[in-house]
Image (spheres, helix red, strand yellow):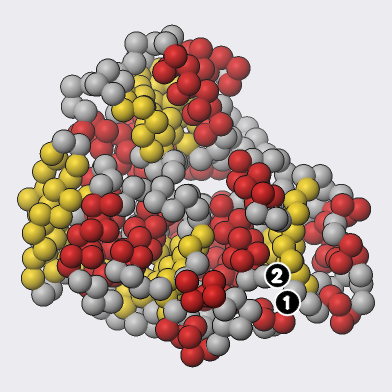
């Protein structure tokens, strides 16, 4: 199937962060774009404002008229894109499937878009959104014409899609010679083995901690998938030094680390000055002195080292790399400051895996060593909570106070015996409670807070603004 022959695209689950980036891309390319999602969100509001037709009821009668024309020739001009989160008995999915439409997963479509271009992919169970966003910002800072499909809303550009200027200028006539030179940055998502649709020129693998065991069953099978992805990289593979032994790369990768001097790229002389990280980066060809990262968190220093490695492979000048690190503002819901005063710090973070929680909490404690840290955590998925219950408890025990919300089920049905109470019982901390959504804002704002964290990947983000407003008003 050739995307240039497709006129109309319909998205089942258009409000997802990855799906919405694709929808924006095709909309910018001049295609007719429409879709369904379960609930309205700020993101779907933005898509509608951009001219995309969206409805929120599973009802084939609400489909745009062009998709009701079942003529085979007409159907060949349509593409249906779906996310695995959409159930197979969804009536619209069933309609498209029974009537022989072109139906593809989001990852397959991303593979089709990137196959003709010079692609830089970032994979990993965590760190990929920040790292891919930083790499895209680095390319922009170096005035390289690039596009990017990102798994979060970048603070610098306020979008999850960046389009190259040349691509915007010739959306429907993009010639093959141009596309071969065009740089595209993408997140390579391991869920459902989606990243195996990608064959990037350059790839970064940030982590292979066990996750998505509902799909993989065992960590070794997940690592096998990462090994398959690593072998699909055409040119340069950049791997975090500590996970080099976990994956079979097929060739010696370039390695990076925050402080392991045996890596090809690593940081040294790391200090915090006025809330910013200052450090040197060692490369195979010399040392970049006194880089300043505009983003908090020691784990982000490590992410930045991998971005420096990409920059060096692309022969980007040191001054442009320096400027990019200093001016990078991060990604919404990744160590995202909501309040930052001498009396109160409020940070919102997407962390939903034990290792992500540990990295976020430890970074906060490093930056605010004499402050009490209160965390609100919403577990995401019953299966993930079950599979990593002990690790979640250990990470949450790093907090001085913990407020647990009930598990956000997403695509899952409840699992007997798996609950937030189970997590609470495993924690050793004495300062821990469970709060219902109806009580959460009052519960939080009635406390004496010094540093507050909201953590999780469910709908905890809908409570961030109400909490922020009430705290400011107090």
Residue 162: percent from left, percent from top = 48, 62
Q: Nearer the viewer, residue 32 or 353?
A: 32
Q: CA distance from mark 1 to mark 2?
A: 8 Å
Confirm or deny contact between disc 1 and disc 2 (CB under 8 A).
Answer: yes
Going by the image, does 24 lie left or right of 217?
right
Residue 148: percent from left, percent from top = 46, 65
Residue 422 visible? The answer is: no
User: Residue pushed farthest bottom?
Assistant: 177
Residue at 39% x, 22% y: name it: 402
Residue 179: percent from left, percent from top = 49, 83
Q: Nearer the viewer, residue 411 or 38?
A: 38
Which residue is disc 2 drawn over? 31
Based on the displayed image, in which of its 4 quarters is residue 458 positioned?
Answer: top right
Other-residue count near label 1 (Cα within 10 Å), few / some / many at <14 / 14–19 / ≥20: some
Which residue is disc 1 drawn over? 6
Q: Nearer the viewer, residue 175 or 219?
A: 175
Residue at 14% x, 40% y: name it: 272
Residue at 44% x, 41% y: name it: 333
Residue 396: percent from left, percent from top = 36, 29
């Amino acid at each position: 199937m050739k995307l240039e022959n497709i006129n109309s695209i319909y998205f089942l689950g258009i409000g997802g962060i990855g799906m919405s980036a694709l929808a924006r891309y095709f909309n910018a390319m001049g295609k007719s774009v429409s879709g369904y999602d379960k609930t309205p969100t700020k993101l779907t509001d933005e898509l509608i404002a951009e001219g995309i037709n969206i409805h929120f009821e599973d009802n084939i009668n609400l489909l745009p008229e062009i998709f009701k024309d079942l003529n085979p020739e007409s159907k060949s001009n349509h593409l249906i894109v779906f996310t695995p989160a959409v159930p197979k008995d969804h009536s619209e999915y069933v309609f498209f499937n029974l009537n022989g439409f072109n139906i593809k997963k989001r990852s397959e479509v991303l593979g089709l878009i990137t196959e003709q271009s010079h692609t830089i992919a970032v994979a990993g169970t965590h760190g990929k959104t920040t790292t891919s966003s930083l790499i895209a910002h680095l390319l922009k800072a170096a005035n390289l014409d690039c596009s990017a499909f990102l798994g979060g809303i970048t603070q610098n550009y306020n979008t999850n899609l960046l389009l190259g200027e040349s691509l915007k200028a010739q959306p429907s006539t993009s010639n093959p010679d141009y596309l071969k030179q065009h740089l595209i940055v993408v997140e390579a998502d391991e869920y459902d083995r989606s990243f195996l649709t990608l064959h990037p020129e350059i790839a970064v693998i940030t982590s292979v901690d066990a996750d998505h065991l509902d799909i993989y069953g065992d960590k070794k099978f997940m690592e096998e998938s990462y090994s398959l992805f690593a072998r699909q990289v055409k040119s340069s593979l950049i791997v975090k030094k500590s996970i080099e032994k976990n994956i079979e790369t097929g060739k010696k990768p370039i390695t990076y680390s925050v402080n392991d001097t045996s890596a090809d790229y690593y940081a040294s002389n790391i200090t915090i000055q006025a809330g910013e990280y200052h450090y040197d980066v060692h490369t195979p060809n010399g040392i970049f002195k006194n880089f300043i990262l505009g983003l908090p968190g020691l784990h982000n220093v490590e992410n930045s080292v991998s971005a420096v490695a990409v920059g060096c492979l692309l022969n980007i000048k040191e001054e442009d790399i320096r400027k990019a690190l200093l001016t990078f503002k991060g990604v919404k819901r990744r160590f995202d400051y909501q309040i930052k005063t001498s009396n109160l710090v409020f940070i919102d973070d997407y962390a939903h895996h034990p290792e992500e929680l540990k990295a976020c909490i430890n970074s906060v404690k490093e930056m605010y060593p004499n402050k009490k840290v209160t965390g609100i955590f919403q577990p995401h998925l019953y299966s993930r909570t079950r599979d990593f219950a002990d690790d979640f408890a250990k990470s949450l025990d790093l907090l001085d106070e913990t407020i647990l919300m009930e598990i956000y089920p997403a695509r899952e049905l409840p699992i007997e015996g798996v609950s937030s109470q189970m997590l609470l019982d495993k924690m050793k901390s004495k300062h821990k409670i469970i709060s219902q959504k109806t009580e959460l804002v009052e519960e939080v704002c009635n406390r004496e807070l010094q540093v507050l964290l909201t953590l999780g990947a469910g709908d905890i983000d809908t409570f961030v603004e109400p909490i922020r407003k009430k705290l400011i008003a107090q």
